[in-house]
Each structure stands twice: as structure tokens, then as C-alpha cells.
Image: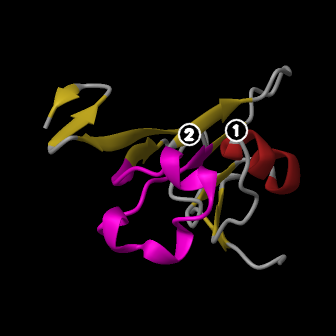
Amino acid sequence: MDEYIQLPDTNCKLVHGFPSSKYPAAAHHQFWGDCIAGHVHKPDEYTARHIDRGQAFTVGCLADIKQMTYANRHPAKLGWRQGWLYGYINSKTGKWNAWNVKNDQGTWLSPMGIL
């Protein structure tokens, strides 16, 4: 599971994702370092507690979660949300940031407000 796509001009990796936990972004950061991960369907973010302030994000999915009946037995499904991620890259410094957008009962919410 060492395959990833390097986000241009940054140290951020785009990964398929696999560690599912109460805090999936932190679990992904432990394994990959700075990264954006899908697959766990739970929007989450993590900022590392060290001088470099690394960060990781997990992203919701755009599927109809109710139709994903294969996971009905798993409590983690209760944390799944529809969502997507947007952000920026400063190509001069390599700094980047991202924000999760989540669907809350038919309303798309971002840190910037209702979309």
C-alpha cells in the first residue's frame, strides 16, 4: 500500500485510504504524513502537534450512503457523510490547505457557509 499521487509543489500525498477509526485523518497521517485520503467516507481533519504542523484530511463520498447496504453491520457507517474537499496550493512556498464540504440533511455546508 505504498502507492500514492504526489500533489504538485507540496509534500501532500493523495492516497486511496484504508485506516478506519474514530479519527481516520490522524491514522492516515501516522502512516503517510501529510495526505488527503478517500475510501473511509468520513470527513475528518488532523493537524500534527509538532513544529512542522503536518496535516491530513479524509473525505466524504458522493455516493448514496443509504444504498451502500454492504456496510449496514458496521458501526463506522454511522459516521459516513456525503462530501468533497476543496483547497489551495501556494506553488512558491509549498504550503497547502483544504476544507471539507459535507451534506447535512440535503444542505451542503462548508467552513465558508452554506453552498
Name the disc covering residue 44, or none. 2
Q: Is there a contact, CB below 8 Å, between mark 1 and mark 2?
A: yes
Give how far across and how far down residue 49 sits, in percent. 82, 21
Query: Residue 13 appears in which quarter of the rendering?
Result: bottom right
Residue 91 in sight:
no
Q: Which residue sits furthest front?
A: 73
**Closest to the observer: 14 or 88?**
14
Query: Residue 36 appears in which quarter of the rendering?
Result: bottom right
Q: Which secondary structure, mark 1? A: loop
Which amino acid, mark 1?
Tyr
Residue 76 is inside the magenta segment: yes
Name the disc covering residue 23, or none. 1
Q: Give the CA separation, mark 1 to mark 2.
A: 7 Å
Quadrant in which the N terminus is drawn: bottom right
Residue 61 is inside the magenta segment: yes
Give how far across and how far down residue 20 sits, in percent. 71, 55
Q: Upstream in the sequence, badge 1 or badge 2?
A: 1
Quadrant in which the C terminus is drawn: top left
Start-end of magenta stretch:
57-85
**Closest to the observer: 112 or 12?**
112
Q: Which residue is drawn at 32% across and 26% down?
A: 111
Instruction: Please give left or right for residue 84 compared with residue 4 in the image.
Output: left
Residue 2 in sight:
yes
Give how far across and how far down residue 44 sits, in percent. 56, 39
